[in-house]
Amino acid sequence: MTKVTMSVNGKSVSGEVAGNTLLVDFLRQDLRLTGTHVGCDTSQCGACVVHVNGEAVKSCTMFAAEAEGAEVATIEGQAAADGTLNTLQQAFQDYHGLQCGFCTPGMVMSAAALLKENPQPSEAEVRDYLEGNICRCTGYHNIVRAIMAASGQQVPAVAAE
Amino acid sequence: MYSFDIERPTSVADAVAALGADEALALGGGQTLIPTLKQRLASPSKLVSLSGIAEMKGVSQDGNTLRIGGGTTHASVAREAGAFPALAALAGNIGDPAVRNRGTIGGSLANNDPSACYPAAALGAGAMIVTDRREIAADDYFQGMFATALEEGEIITAVTFPIPAKAAYMKFEQPASRFALVGVFVSQGDAGVRVAVTGASEGGVFRWSAAEEALSGNFSADAISGLSLPADDMIADLHGTAAYRAHLVSVMTRRAVAAAG
């Protein structure tokens, strides 16, 4: 076992992990931050996306020990302390960007990383950035609309592809 | 996963020492190795994570040579390799954004997946693979599917690319995995014309010498319009037959030449 210390949503946390403990398992099982989901566990679906040092990563495909000293941000840290949703989360609600909600934590974290890098993405850029996030309910249109709205842009009437 | 220890050295020297242990494996960005471990296809006693080694990260230019640290992520190459636009574009189209934030050029080249993008760039641009103990020309480095010239415990610390006058990479994506069903990297520079093909051959990445010869006299898509490759040693799987891949090689080569201008 190895001791790891990292900052998660601004709070310093530490724990004992095995070499093969994935970051997502440390978050969910040790810290009980179960907002980050495990969908496929094969790096394809993106339900487990969190930020490590500001960059979106799949937490099912990174070891907890590799996050030693890192700043980790999860879906739990997105809303304000009183539960008020941030702009992006509110847009997902306003534009019905979720149905079952399973992929939503990863979608929101990926979208947040996109908007940090590219504050006014085009619809095509949004779709391209979400390539590694799979949603089985919405058909993506309302997710794209929510992200466009959160970036302060006019929401396109997205055409069915 | 089987159980193993994990170490995070902060220098190449310490990483090489740690890899001296029995059954130790180097861990780059883990985007291939971690799924492999989950499937219990590998059982190392120890993983030596290279992600904490600052000297292995970053992109720098020295004249006409671009040097990329072995631990540099695809996302960093996409952002910082502007001096070699074809390479930056290739890096920016590997996998998806989250994968690009972890996966590294050294990890990709050490793994030498027959459908990976970076091997095509390294071979197609005539790169030099720099390790903790020597430099290996790309022409000598790739030795077949998942096989390379690397010795046990040898670490790719950097890759140096001569920046070609013209270059482009065209990938026909397998839409689920986003690996190359066929990818072709072409370049024209001081070393002449090079055409490297990934995703197609049972032997891994290879140079298409007939196309190189034809393009040396006339660097245009027309120069190779009549050329085709035999399908004999092409990969055949549920995504495409050998004949389909052989055909795609010609098409993607023509597109790459046209894109390189």
Image (cartoon, coloured by chain):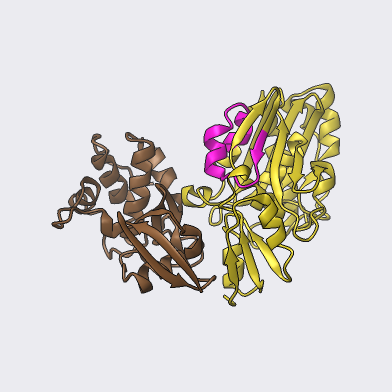
Chain colours: A brown, B yellow
Asked if the magenta segment contains residue B75, the reply would be yes
Q: Quadrant of residue A69?
A: bottom left
Work out whether B87 lies above or below B165: below
Work out whether A150 lies above or below A56: above
Q: Quadrant of residue A8?
A: bottom left
Q: Residue at x 69, y 67 (%)?
A: B24
Q: Is residue A99 visible?
A: yes
Asked if the magenta segment contains residue B259, the reply would be no
Q: Is residue B248 visible?
A: no
Magenta stretch, residue numbers: B67-89
Q: Residue at x 42, y 50 (%)?
A: A56
Left or right, A60 with respect to A153, comes to right
Q: Nearer the viewer, residue A113 or B160?
A: B160
**Residue A85, horizontal then vertical, whole percent:** 18, 52
Work out whether B227 lies above or below B26: above
**Residue A46, horizontal then vertical, whole percent:** 42, 58
**Residue B79, horizontal then vertical, whole percent:** 52, 35
Q: Residue at x 28, y 50 (%)?
A: A142
Left or right, B103 with respect to A137, comes to right
